[in-house]
Image (cartoon, grey):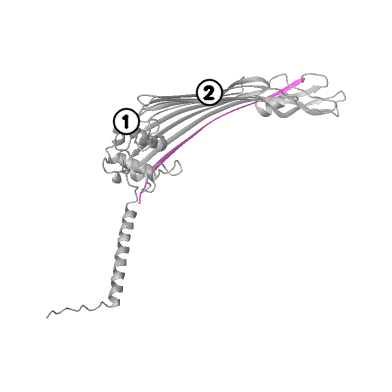
Amino acid sequence: MRMTAITPKKPLNYIAGTCIRFFLLVAMAKGLVMLRAENNPLPPPTARNVDFNADILPILRESCFQCHGQENIEGNYRLTSRTEALKEGDYGSNIEIGNSAESTLIQFVAHLEEDYEMPPIGKGDKLTNEEIGLLRAWIDQGLPFEDISEESFYFKVAPQLRFIAVDGNKNAFREHYWMRDGINGGIQNFEWKQTLEGGTSFSGDGRITAPNDRYTVEAEIQKRDLGFFRFGLDQARTYDDPHGGYSPSFNLGPYALNRDLHLDLSNVWFEFGLNRPDLPSLTVGYEYRSRNGSKSMLQWGPAFDAAFNGRSIFPAWKRIDQETHIITLGLEHEWNGYRIQDDFRGEFYNQTHTLETGDFISDGDPLPGFVSTQEDDYDHFQGSNALTVEKKLKP
């Protein structure tokens, strides 16, 4: 005789408890996955082999070379060659070959380090997940690099030619618009940039409008890891109306000075600096400003008719000679996490003004019988020095 064991049915509370435990395990597993994702928010590396010229170089040119290229070097770090990319910068080693997740470069471009986002917030767009994935694969695959040519040349010029016809008071037009009527022209703007092998670059821009209206030129020469030289010229001319007042009740005027009133404004400066990586950076500058010429004044002299009725309507003018010499000196160095900067500025100023006013002119006379002359001489020196010490504290 065969005996069959009878298995009792499981109670409903046992089945419900099993289901609850199952769902709890699923929720815990999902939580662990989410926690791992939060602890590792980096986009994954691109699964394929990356091509430097097609995948990496466009990212470097768009988002990195502005601060870590041939001309501008922030943080003492450059991404222009494999050797330079593997060097330590101000924050130590930035790339660990084969370990992109721990590379400082990836953490900076992924904005994982507060206050160290690259590109800096407000100075460029954050890299996309796809771009970060390409950079991660580039590092994990051994950091393959191709030669990046340093040589480049760019030149742009826009000529101009204009003719101005004035129907009315030409002197008032020149005074208000700082330009003369007739034919004039020149170069509306030009721009020049050139980079040579070895880290030498030239650049310049400006505008030239003749005759005597505006000249603006700036130029710069840089040598990587050595220094720079900059200079500039800015010159303009303003015009004044040489006419005085008019009195219709006494039939006096208008009177005019027998001279062309204009004032030349000039500004010439140069600056050179040394910025070797192993030495403090030094900058020395000089600037010359001047205002030379003559301008009309409102201290008009008296004019009289035959009945000796007078009005102050005869024009006055002032001769202006002003010069300013400015010397600047800057020193900056980073040491042991501190940034030390010292800036000096000295200004030497002198002026000589000569005011001429007609004291008496009769109706019908082209020039006054008497002229008063007042001279004003003045000079001063101003100097300032600022010392700055900074230490960045990272929580």
Residues rendered magenta in the picture:
368-395
The residue at the point 30 percent across, 70 percent down is: 19
Q: Amino acid at mark 1?
A: Glu
- Say whether residue 216 is visible: no
**Which label is found at residue 157?**
2
**Which label is found at residue 216?**
none
Where in the figure is residue 32, as x and y percent of width and height?
30, 59
Quick check: 55 left or right of 185?
left
- The picture quadrant where one finds residue 147 is top left
> Marks 2 and 1: which is nearer the front?
1
Q: Residues within 10 Å of mark 2 (few under 14, many from 20)?
A: some
Residue at the disc numbered 1: 146
User: Which residue occupies the extreme front position in the image?
Assistant: 1
Q: For marks 2 and 1, give the CA distance.
A: 33 Å
Figure check: 62 above or below 166: below
The residue at the point 29 percent across, 73 percent down is: 15
User: Which residue occupies the extreme left position in the image?
Assistant: 1
**Residue toward you, 9 or 358:** 9
Q: Amino acid at mark 2?
A: Val
Quadrant including the N terminus: bottom left
**Residue toward you, 16 or 375:** 16
- Helix, strand or loop at label 1? It is loop
